[in-house]
Each structure stands twice: as structure tokens, then as C-alpha cells.
Amino acid sequence: MTETATTGGFTPPTRFAVPGRIAVSDRAAAVWQTATLTEIRRETPSVATFRFAVPGWAGHLPGQHLMLRLTAGDGYTAQRHYSLASPPDDAGHIELTLDHVEGGEVSGWFHTEARPGDEVAVRGPLSGFFAWPGDRPALLVGAGSGVVPLMSMIRHHRARGLDVPLRLLVSARGPEELIYAAEYGAETTAVFTRRAPDGVPVGRLSAEHVAPLLAERPPGGWEAYVCGSNAFAEHASRLLVEAGQPVHRIRIERFG
Amino acid sequence: MNVTRGFTGRPRVPRPGLPPGQYDSGDDWPVLSAEVTPDLAPADWTFRIDGLVAEPRSWDWDEAHTLPASVYEGAIHCVTSWSKFGVRFGGVSLDAFLDVVRPDASATHAVAYAHSGYTTNLPLADLTGGRAWIAWEYDGEPLPAEHGGPARLLVPHLYFWKSAKWIAGLTLLDHDEPGFWEQNGYHARGNPWEEQRYSGD
């Protein structure tokens, strides 16, 4: 565990960042391991979950990511960072949920070529910053595939039967594009920006969604985790700040 | 590692200047920062160099702009594996600032700190000799806030997490001291040509 102060006594005008809370294993991060695809589950028309057996996986915390590498016949490699979707208590297995990106070199392979038995290389888990061990009240805000690391947190919360408060605001264009739709419970509020079921308003995430959650501020306050496109992350983090969430207690993962 | 069945990769032409494990992001310039983008006006921006120097000092926006202008044109490389070619940043060479404060002979490293509180560590040798800038323009326009505007550190020969956005200062030290990402498992130096991505690489 690290709780380290910044150097030299400089006090930033906008306090950032709860520093990383989790010591990352140098060894685990440095070693490439073989991950064998065991299962593919469709989530939405453009999103699927890929389950892998990784026997030597050292475990992870909800919110962490890994680096994945594909190797072509001529030795060319492509590597990408992906958030882990599965909770830590999934011994020897990990899951990634990938959007089929238009023209995507790696996501394209996954969505058009990959089948059980295929092997890829992974290293990780990486970064203790956007990680939630389940010890503090967590307010999760995600859009699109930005909900993936947040779902790892929700699954962890459920699997362990944690009673620390957890809330999720998840934004999707429409119900058919809501990833993990069948898995959400009372902790989740879905926001639909283009199409919504009858009786549900259509519109982007707004102060009206954020205010009630900040009003029910738990003892010690929320740790906020925001994940999505940069545009969404900018929008959501500003809403949180305007609603009173301290800047230094907002962790952001931006999908480029 | 074995070949990935069915993976050929995108059509590729040799790209001089592309470090191992990187791809050309083309026109895209992804935004990667872990914190809320600070609301920082040029009038409120300051830059300070302290620690092991003869004369610590701070510059405000106007004072920094009296130093000789300097441009970087070339590529930048992000640890998440994209590289971007043909970028053009305007600002001032860090040498111009360091000439004023005069680093001690004992100074070997620096911690760069941002107005957001972000920190990152660098060997002093990576900040001198015309290889580092304080940049406030991109492509002839003011640097956008989400990319570190009004001003950021620019150290293009290292992975881009070293180029601290919203730069507030440098503290010169006689030892290395891990910054924000380095405490989170990233490499102390971050040389893209040696793929120094994570601690242990």
C-alpha cells in the first residue's frame, strides 16, 4: 500500500488525486503470460465478453487493467490496454469486454476471428490508481464500454457480500447498447441518450442524476470512479465537481 | 510468444521513427489523464524551479513569454502504444529556464509537479540539451486544456506520461524519486526505444 505525499511541499491549487492506493507487483506487470480463450459471450450487437484461462494470473483488484498482445506470422505485434471485467475471485480466469471498434486492429481480430482455444499474451494487472478494493463507499459513473472496470467492482461487491455503499450511473445510447443490462440491480441508474424504453426519459447524464447520489453522501464521502470516452469523462467529472464531489476524490479512466 | 492464429495486423508500411510496440495514431490525439481537467487560466499559471539550484525562481505567464521562443516538431509516444507524428508544439526550451536558476552540480534528477498535483520523475539529463520544453502552443494555437493547457512539460523522447500537463514546477534532487505513475507500477525513465513501460522492463 502506498499513501505518498508529493515532493517538496508544493500545494497544488486543485488538489489531485488520491495517489495510487495499491502497490502494483513489478513482477506481475513485467511478465507476459499466455491467456487461452475459453468462452465468448455476446453482450450487445457490437460488444462481446471474452473469457480466458490464465493459470498463472496473480489476481487483481476491481478497476485494474492489463496489456494484451497479438502476434502476426511475420513477427508484427499489436498491443492494447484493456480493463478487466471480471472480479478477483475467479481463480485462474479473467474476462475482458471489448467493443468492436470500427477498423480496430485488435478488437477486429477478437470480433471476427477469435474462437475458444486461441492464445494471446497478457501482462498485468497494471496500475493501482483506478482500483477499488471494496473498502470505501464508491460512486461509479460510466458510459459505453467505460462500464467494464466498474462492473468488475459491482461483481466484487456482490461476490463478497460487501455492505459498503456502491452506486452506478451508466449511460448508453439505448437499451440494446447497454452492456451487462441483465446484471444491474438496485445500485444502478441507467441513462439513455438516444432511445429509451417507454416511460423513461431520453437525455444525457445531468446534474439531476448526480445530485441525489451526492445528497445521500455516506460517512467519509464517496470515492468517485469515472470511465468512458474523453468527452464523457470531461462532462461527468465536471458534473461531479459542480455537485460538490471533491476534485481529489475523483479517479478517471479515459478511453481514447 | 506464439503467433496468434488468424491475426495479420493492419496493412503496414515501414514507419521510420516508430518505436517497438507502437502504432501510428494518425490524426487521433487521445486524451489520457487520471484527474479532473483543472480550470487554469494563463493569468493564474506559474512555473517554478527549486530544489538543488543556485537561485530558485518562479515565472508567471508574461515573464515566461519573455524567454526565447522554441519549437518542437516531431513525434510523441504514449505508453498505451499509440505514437503521433508531425506534431508541432511552441513554447520555450527548458534550457532557457534552467540557465536562470543554475542547477547545482549535485542535481541528478527532477520531480515535475503539476497544478493538478500530478507528479513525474525524470533524470536531469533528459531535461537539458534541447530535449525538453515548456509548451503552450499546439499547431499554432493555444494548447487545449485537456492536453495540458495553458502550459505543459514536453519531453518527446520519453513516453508521454513524463510530459506533465498543467506544469507547475520542477524540484531538482540528488536522487530519483518516483512520481504518480511511477508509484503505480510504471517505469522510472520511460524510454520508448527500449520499451521501458513498466517497472521491471
Image (spheres, helix red, strand yellow):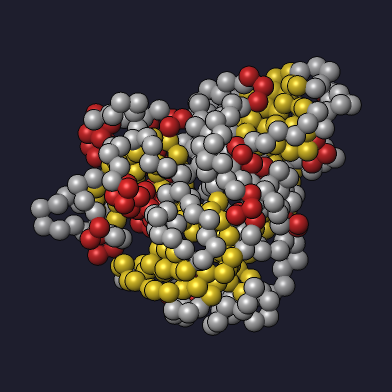
Q: Where is residue A181 in the image (x, y as percent from the top left)?
A: 25, 59
What residue sits 80% from the left and 22% below the top?
B52
**Vertical placement of residue A138 versus A62, above or below:** above
Of A55 and A15, which appears nearest the observer?
A55
Q: Which image quarter holds the N terminus of chain A? A: top right
Q: Can residue A237 be seen in this view?
A: yes
Question: Looking at the rendering, which quadrant does residue B111 occupy?
Answer: top right
Q: Which residue corresponds to the image point at 22% horizontal and 34% vertical from the top-left?
A: A212
Asked if residue A94 is positioned above or below residue B189 in the image, the reply reads: below
Identity of the residue furthest to the left in this view: A199
* Up-down relation of residue A127 to residue B2 (above or below): above
Count all numbered tags in the image, as a single digit: 0
Q: Is residue A230 among the parts visible in the rendering?
A: no
> Residue A61, percent across and down?
45, 48
Q: Position of residue A218 (x, y in %)?
A: 28, 29
Where residue A225 sits, quadrant-wise, is top left
Q: Nearer the viewer, residue A132 or A167?
A: A132
Q: In this view, does A97 lie above or below A29?
A: below
Give x and y (percent) for residue A126: 55, 51
Depth order, front residue of A146/A184? A184
Image point (60%, 54%), residue name: A28
Query: Would residue B104 be found to the left or right of residue A136 on screen?
Result: right
Q: In which quarter of the image is residue B170?
A: top right
Report the residue that reaches farthest toward the right.
B105
Q: Nearer the viewer, residue B142 or B183?
A: B183
Residue at image coords 64%, 82%: A73
